[in-house]
Image: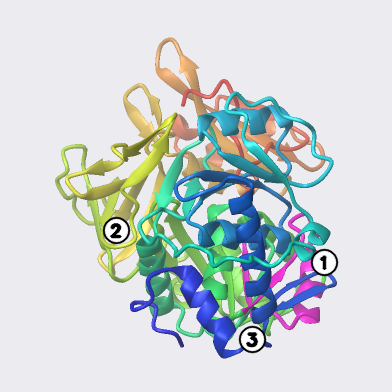
Amino acid sequence: MINLASTPNLIEVIYQHADAQPDATALICGNTTLSAGELRNIVDRCAAELLRQGLTDGDRLGIQLQDTWEFVAVLLAAIRISVTVVPLDWRASPREIERLSDYFALTGIARVPGSPDIRALQDPITIYVDGVWLHNLPDSGTPLPPVNNVTPFLISLSSGTTGDPKGVYCTFEDFTARLQRNLKVFEALPGLRYLSCLPLCFSAGIFYCLDSLCLGNVVILYPTLFAPQEIIKAVKQHRATLLLVVPTIVRGLLELPESRPPLLHDLIYLISTGGPLTPDEKKLTVTQINANFYDIFGTSASGLLCVAGPDDMATAPKSLGRAMPFLEHEIVDNDGSTVPIDTPGLLRCRGAGISDSAWEGDKDTARSEGIDAGWYYTGDIASIDSNGRYYLHGRADNVINRGGVNIYPNVIEAVLRKHQKVNEVVVFGKPDPQLGEYVAAMIVVTGQVNDADLIAYCRDKLAPHLVPKEFIFKSSLSKTSAGKIKLPADASH
């Protein structure tokens, strides 16, 4: 394997693979298969075209393309000429793209032909991209400029539930440190066939794609809108050995009538990210879907922080697992003092690979939010047990304060998910004139169930102050592109 530590940027790593094995398959997308050499050729020609269009070192390019090989080609081309990429959801409305374009002061936007016009204040260069355009690009002609190893290659957007967009810079140094941590835990990563079914605008989706290309793996791009049966078929058809999913996909697989052990037995790794699974769901996934199931926890600013493997699922299924190597982790109170074992507090960490700068509004800035004396505060409430396993209690800004008592929504959500008629749930606080906040739950149900039924169910399993005062019934819950449930507008936070 190529020595990551001695290679200054990910483009050089990918190009070294192309030089060593130009005919090796790099990307598969529908009927298109690109070898490592073909991918490099397309990237170089696209990079030259981006320069001709006026983009240069330090500019910001939004990519609003579907999760296809064209996205990957433009992504690598921008990185090749030291342009910082801002991944955009291809399903976003023109008004949302205008807002993001202005917020991140985009120099250009790559979009599919026929996209609706936008009227952003910055008037970014619009580059219409499809496969025909990429294949017909002329050769670069003159040599491309060297990669600026200092320019951040990505603004990684937060996949949170509410608020303005938050984008943290990722440098080549950050990327390398995160990949080296992953390799320490997932030793069999090199040589795998990665089925990419998460949005490439989602930080985990884009990073696992880049990780795989840097390791010389095959990346199989699969449409992100699919039924569970389709993902099973795709894994078998493409002989995939690595699959990264969000919890909603895991639940869909578990609900299949053909979920007989083991459903996806050929996978070397099945990894879930982007949200919590219940202990029962974790155990069932190991026994019914894949024995090499891992649940990972991290942030856009840090990469992976904790990982729970099959052993953790068996002995401590409620936990996040153990801390990733090469990082310091602590649980502290509001004053920064460490708290006792099994006591909830603020999760913080420090080490290589953690971003310390961000794009905030219309300026570059050192990232102050979440950084204190060299420690990165993730914004999560967590605890650690005597065996070194971490437990998540909720987001610090989502904790419900009811009469001075802190309530963690995930505790209530876990109980409600076990109700046989509850399909989806999100718990949050709403303003209360006497208590400050009260507990509310927004749910999707199957069949007939009412407030009284759910209140009685919760009273049997929760302390009185944890029982939701209000249930809001929905036919579906709005989600981010990463599959996370969005909080309603009238939530307290």
Q: Are marks 3 and 2 in contact (CB under 8 Å)?
A: no
Estimate the x, y position of residue 175 in percent, counting from the top left.
Answer: 41, 64
Name the N-terminal-most of marks 3 and 2: 3
Residue 116 falls left or right of residue 339: right
Name the residue beneath numbered marker 2. 384
Name the N-terminal-most of marks 1 and 3: 3
Name the residue beneath numbered marker 3. 22
Q: Pick whichever, 360 or 485, lies toward us.
A: 360
Q: Pick whichever, 166 or 387, lies toward us.
A: 166
Estimate the x, y position of residue 41 in percent, counting from the top left.
Answer: 66, 73
Name the residue beneath numbered marker 1. 230
The amino acid type, in three-letter code, at marker 3 is Pro
Element type where label 2 sits in the image:
strand
Q: Which residues are magenta?
A: 218-245
Find the distance from the CA under tag 3 to the CA under tag 2.
47 Å
The amino acid type, in three-letter code, at marker 1 is Glu
Residue 145 in sight: yes
Label ID, residue 479: none
